[in-house]
Image (spheres, rainbow, N blue to C red):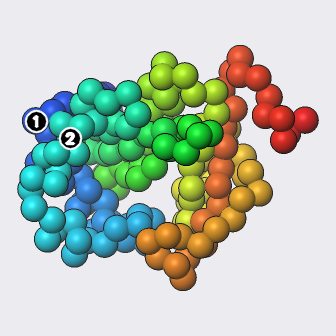
Amino acid sequence: MSPSLTVRRIVADQGAVLRELRTASLRDAPYAFGDSLEDALSADAAVFDAAAARHADSHTATSFILYTEGHPAGLIGANFESAPARRAFVFALWVAPAVRHLRGGELLVNAAIDWLASEGAQQIYAWVTDSNTTAMRFYERLGFVATGDHARSTQTPEQWETLLMRELAGAAPLASAQ
């Protein structure tokens, strides 16, 4: 029997869980995220506590946590950019290696997309590091396509990223795609 997976939005008192998952993700795949493990480890616990509290009830940014048998095993962020376009993004997706085969990443992305759609999103974007071909293929399997935007990573300028986008069902087509 395979373990039970659930996804829940972060709650205000889960700063320690957020820190645990963030540092685990940076240990496992430091090339995939804009932060460094050293920065995450040296950050005061209050930074993670404040982020969890903010994400628990915000209408512009949140985090979702994947649980397997009640234990935290994955994380994704979702937010709206503050620019006038107010594009919706998923970011910092990570699933513990021991449960990746159970489709936890898909559950996390779908939870984030559902939340973004409930807040008005019609397209969902994700920046993916070009060297992370596994992530690129994963997002493509979930219906994301390259937009043609390609940029240097703001946190790691030697890395390039590709902007992916997924049109949500029932959303009007993008003017640039017509």
State the image coordinates of residue 106 (x, y, percent, origin top left). 48, 37
Q: Residue at x 24, y 31 (%)?
A: 56
Q: In what element is the residue under mark 1?
A: loop
State the image coordinates of residue 70 (x, y, percent, origin top left). 17, 32
In the current view of this chain or complex, which residue is farthest to the front? 84
* Disc 2 to disc 1, C-alpha distance: 7 Å
Residue 104 seen in render: no
State the image coordinates of residue 26 (x, y, percent, origin top left). 31, 66
Q: Quadrant of residue 4?
A: top left
Residue 149 seen in render: yes
Residue type highlighted by circle 1: Asp
State the image coordinates of residue 40 (x, y, percent, origin top left). 21, 66
Residue linked to disc 1? 13
Give above or below for 32 relative to 80. Answer: below
Residue linked to disc 2? 52
Decide: marks 2, 1 in contact (CB < 8 A)?
Answer: yes
